[in-house]
Amino acid sequence: MRRFFLLIPVLVLIISGCSKKNRFEVDVSDIDTSVEIKRLDQDLFNINLDSIHNEIPYLSDKYGEFYELYNHQVIRVGGSNSKAYPDNLRGFLTDYVINNVHNKVMEKYPDVNRLEKELTNAFKHYKYYFPEKTIPAIYTFIGGFNQSIVIDDSTLAIGLDKYLGRDCKFYDRLGWAEYLQQDMLRNIIPSDCMRSWAKTEWPFNDSTDNVMSNMIYRGRLLYFVRSMMPEAHDSLITGFTTSELQWCENNEEQMWTHLVEEKLLFSTDYMTINKLVNPAPFTSGFPRQSPGKAAVWLGWQIVDEYMRRNKDLSLKELMETEDYRKILRESHYKP
């Protein structure tokens, strides 16, 4: 395996970053799309517990199917029609820890105006590229740290208690590793939303489940997010820190050489795939300075090069392509 070099060509980083942004800028000013976020996290904790039976129909009517999904799958207190539900819900709403979490969420997110603007802009780009697609209804909730993003049919919901910042004391008390807390930031929410939505619209074709297909599929999701958020910094697209991004830029050739020389690209071993593309303190097989899932960043570069070489190919065609080997072959990727 070749050595990994840690030189930092800052000028190259600046130039490549600018060209990448310019390529994705499109005019969405005439697209009539607006995101309104309904805040279950506020409405739920504002109900009158002394008349909780009367409050439940209001919540059920306002939040529809998502309310039942929230009850069953997120906080797991049962359906709103069950006899035990009012007491179960009261227990959740009066829990000491959950109330502290709620207070922290309200302190961090007194309003979601900025988030609405960011998601409006992202979904305007979504309608630009996919005019036939439906914009989901968007909600926020507190889930007791169970879920970050919940998606069901035409619904996208955000667990605000999973985005309280890297210095949140609750995360340390839960024993979550630092690398897991790294992405629990308010600024990450829009990219998490768009990537999660894309995963449900274009799920992974696991008939070719190997390292290469996972790299390119997940890299394609990053390319999608970049298309939805052309002005966002790469750190918000990837969840990497600036120094981690620089490390990837500096060691792109060495990472690729390692995967090729060690014959890892077409490995179907589950553990090998997991070590290369899933969150971790660093990417197994790479130096400890590497970010976790660095191979996904390589997948993004492959997809980006593939689209550079196929300028007539639409984003829709890219997202519907399940031939990952073709993307690799026609990208002529050579860092």
Image (spheres, grey):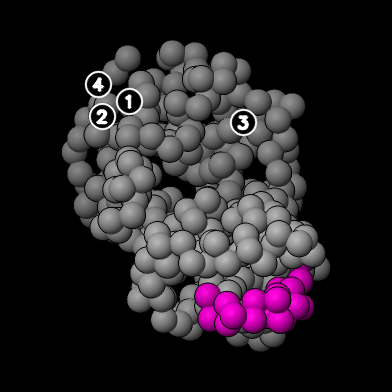
Identity of the residue drawn at 27% across and 26% down: 287
Q: Amino acid at mark 3?
A: Ser
Task: Name the mark on residue 3.
Answer: 4
Q: Earlier in the sequence, mark 4 or mark 3?
A: 4
Alpha carbon distance from label 2 to label 1 = 7 Å
Give residue 270's quadrant in the image. Answer: top right
| Main secondary structure type of the part rendered in magenta | helix
Q: Which residue is mark 3?
A: 213
Mark 1: secondary structure: loop
Q: Amino acid at mark 1?
A: Phe
Q: Which residue is mark 2?
A: 288
Give percent across and percent down for residue 196: 60, 54
Alpha carbon distance from label 4 to label 3 = 26 Å
Q: Which label lies toward us, 4 or 2?
A: 2
Q: Earlier in the sequence, mark 3 or mark 2?
A: 3
Q: Which label lies toward us, 4 or 3?
A: 3
Closer to us: 126 or 148: 148
Mark 1 burial class by Cα count in 10 Å: few <14, some 14-19, many 20+:
many
Relative side of 117 to 207, left or right:
left
Task: Name the mark on residue 286.
Answer: 1
Q: Earlier in the sequence, mark 1 or mark 4?
A: 4
How many numbered marks appear?
A: 4
Q: Amino acid at mark 4?
A: Arg
Tell whether position 132 is magenta: no
Relative side of 48 to 81, left or right:
left
Against 8, residue 264 (above or below) is above
The region drawn magenta spans 45-66
Labels 1 and 4 touching (C-beta < 8 A) = no
Q: Earlier in the sequence, mark 4 or mark 2?
A: 4
**Residue 117 visible here:** no
